[in-house]
Image (cartoon, rainbow, N blue to C red):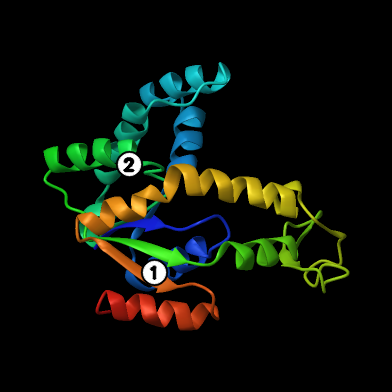
Amino acid sequence: MNIVLLGAPGAGKGTQAQKLVADYQLAHISTGDLLRAAVKAQSELGVAAKGYMDAGKLVPDSLVVDLVLERLEQDDCKNHGFILDGFPRNTKQAEVLDSALADKNVALDAALLVDVASEVIVNRLSSRRTCRECGYTGTAADETCPRCSGEMYQRDDDKPETIQNRLNVYQENTAPLVDYYDARGLLKKVDGDRPVDDVYADVKALFGL
């Protein structure tokens, strides 16, 4: 089962991905993690990517796709399938990815959209608090960290004005992917504005799991 994961920041994509990985041994491929790992390992692709990153430039689509394809060669992807998280970010990247996967005789089974209204995401993320000591993620109701009693604070990323900017970028660049995959008959959509386990039950039903 090979899946592209779609949804706005804060929609709960990562949570659903973690559940699928735990239950079905899918490989969770985050392009951000791939880039950081390649740079740290000083691989050929990592060195090339670092050059762009150090110059403050976006890493070219072709280089990111090469990193993804390199990761897809590993056994866990071949045995159980994968979830692509964070890529593609726009239709141009999706087209590059499709072409590269076709060359490898690898097919996507679905694009899973975790759908949540923008106002719900703003409320959800703006109430989030993070522990300065251990990184625990809680809510505004947590005066101190329930794990280590550390100070809970609101990250800049979780302030309403920042969240709205992130959502605007998503709508402009990433939301068109929904239409792209829908036109290809690959889109599966789930309502993410519900308890995590209810969303996951629907995700499994969509995939016949």
When asked about the image quadrant of residue 145, the answer is bottom right
Q: Between tags 1 and 2, which lies in front?
A: 2
At label 2, counting other C-alpha atoms closer than 10 Å, the crowd grade (few under 14, some 14-19, many 20 or more) is some
Image position, residue 174 (x, y; %): 43, 47
Query: Toward the viewer: 190 or 74?
Result: 190
When asked about the image quadrant of residue 135, the answer is bottom right
**Above or below, 145 relative to 43:** below
Left or right: where 131 falls relative to 10: right
Residue 185, numbered circle: none
**Above or below, 35 relative to 25:** above
Q: Secondary structure at mark 1?
A: helix
Image position, residue 121 (x, y; %): 61, 63
Image position, residue 165 (x, y; %): 64, 45
The N terminus, quarter of image: bottom left
Q: Amino acid at mark 1?
A: Leu
Residue linked to disc 1: 20
Left or right: where 120 falls relative to 191: right
Measure the C-alpha gap from mark 1 to mark 2: 25 Å
Q: Secondary structure at mark 2?
A: helix
Q: Amino acid at mark 2?
A: Thr
Q: Which residue lies at the image location 49% right of the left edge and 19% below the top edge? A: 52
Residue linked to disc 2: 91
Q: Which residue lies at the image location 27% right of the left edge and 54% below the top edge? A: 181
Q: Earlier in the sequence, mark 1 or mark 2?
A: 1
Judge whether residue 25 can be spotted in this image: yes
Q: Which residue lies at the image location 80% right of the left edge and 56% below the top edge? A: 154
Judge whether residue 86 can be spotted in this image: no
Image position, residue 66 (x, y; %): 30, 32
